[in-house]
């Protein structure tokens, strides 16, 4: 297992290299620049700014310079937030994004698995159809629509919860963004769990357990263990989606997380800030997928990587 883990970590290096390379050139080829303002600056001032940030050099030299700094853990200075480095900004926003994404992940897993099991145990009943209808709506409606709807209903119309802001981490400020972020993933997990649970309940070993007179609770527990395997496989991209998906949710609910920095960086053509968020999110994807692979092997002893 240790060899497999090290091999996966090593294979992540070329993946990250490709992501960094593609993102670097896409950002640079986008129209506009970090110093394009409504009131144009004097040509001499613009030239000095480009020289200060080494933007006057050929693009390939800028790319090599960025790679050499990235290897040393230096994400560079922010072009829009003076006196701050990109690393400092990301470290300041990361706790908000992790807290929001982790809460949404827990809600999505608990809610999705519970709904999926309920639907599978009452297949073709009213509860089954209700769960699947809600799950279909959750999959098809994006969270940038769900977020404003929740604000309108629970914030403006009913006045039960705050419209936005972090509020020092108060629970009332977290509820709406967490639900908006978790709902699409919860719907997918519910559908996966239902299908896998129905198949598991019809497996031969589950029929044997029933024939031996074991309780329904024991039978469901054994079936759920097998049904969780596809859910575990999905958790890697789901966890990454919850972190990257918070880009929109953080902006809608005015949460000062990494996602808000990404949007502001893209709008202001802050090259280093956008690249820093891309590198960080790519790292999250790699790590989450590795954790899921290890969990899969632990849950199903038949899976061996060596």
Image (cartoon, grey):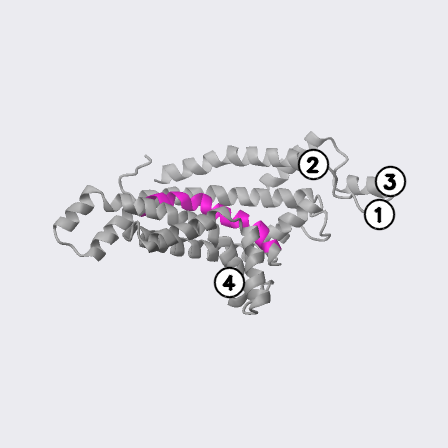
Q: Is residue 138 found inside the magenta-colored segment of the image?
A: no
Residue picked out by circle 2: 30
Is the residue 14 above or below the residue 87 in the image?
Answer: above
Label 3 vs label 2, nearer the camera: 2
- Helix, strand or loop at label 1? It is loop
Q: Marks 4 and 1: in contact by CB < 8 Å?
A: no
Dot placed on the residue nearer the N-terminal end, 2 or 4 = 2
Please state the horizontal and vertical placement of residue 170, each as a whole percent of the image: 53, 67
Label 2 vs label 4, nearer the camera: 4
Residue picked out by circle 1: 39
- Helix, strand or loop at label 3? It is helix
Residue at position x 65%, y 33% in the image: 25
The CA distance from mark 1 to mark 4 is: 41 Å
The CA distance from mark 2 to mark 1 is: 20 Å
The CA distance from mark 3 to mark 2 is: 21 Å
Q: Nearer the viewer, residue 13 or 256?
A: 256
Q: Is residue 298 visible?
A: no
Task: State the extent of the magenta-drawn residues as a range.
Answer: 228-251
Q: Is 231 left, or right, of 24 in this rendering?
A: left
Dot placed on the residue nearer the N-terminal end, 2 or 1 = 2
Residue picked out by circle 4: 175
Dot placed on the residue nearer the N-terminal end, 3 or 4 = 3
Residue at position x 69%, y 34% in the image: 29
Residue picked out by circle 3: 43
Dot placed on the residue nearer the N-terminal end, 1 or 4 = 1
Q: Quadrant of residue 95?
A: bottom right
Q: Is 5 left, or right, of 272 in this rendering?
A: left
Image quarter where the C terminus lies is top left
Is the residue 168 above or below the residue 38 in the image?
Answer: below
């Amino acid at each position: 297992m240790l060899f497999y883990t090290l091999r996966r970590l090593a294979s992540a290096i070329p993946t990250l290299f490709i992501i960094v390379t593609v993102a670097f050139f896409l950002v640079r080829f986008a129209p506009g620049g970090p110093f394009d303002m409504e009131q144009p600056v004097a040509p001499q001032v613009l030239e000095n700014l480009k020289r200060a940030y080494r933007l006057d050099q050929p693009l390939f030299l800028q790319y090599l310079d960025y790679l050499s700094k990235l290897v040393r853990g230096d994400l560079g200075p922010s072009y829009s937030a003076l006196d701050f480095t990109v690393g400092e900004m990301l470290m300041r926003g990361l706790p908000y994004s992790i807290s929001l994404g982790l809460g949404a992940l827990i809600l999505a897993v608990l809610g999705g698995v519970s709904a999926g099991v309920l639907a599978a145990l009452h297949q073709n009943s009213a509860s089954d159809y209700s769960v699947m209808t809600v799950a279909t709506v959750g999959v098809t409606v994006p969270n940038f629509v769900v977020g404003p709807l929740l604000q309108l209903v629970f914030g403006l119309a009913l006045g039960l919860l705050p419209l936005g802001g972090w509020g020092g981490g108060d629970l009332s400020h977290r509820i709406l963004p967490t639900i908006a972020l978790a709902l699409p993933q919860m719907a997918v997990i519910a559908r996966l769990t239902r299908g896998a649970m129905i198949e598991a309940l019809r497996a031969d070993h589950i029929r044997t357990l029933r024939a031996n007179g074991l309780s329904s609770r024991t039978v469901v527990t054994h079936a759920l263990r097998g049904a969780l395997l596809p859910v575990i496989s999905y958790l890697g991209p789901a966890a990454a989606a919850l972190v990257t998906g918070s880009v929109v949710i953080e902006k809608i609910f005015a949460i000062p997380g990494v996602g808000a920095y990404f949007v502001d960086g893209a709008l202001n053509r802050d090259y280093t800030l956008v690249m820093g968020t891309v590198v960080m999110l790519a790292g999250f994807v790699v790590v989450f997928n590795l954790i899921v692979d290890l969990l899969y092997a632990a849950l199903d002893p038949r899976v061996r990587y060596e």
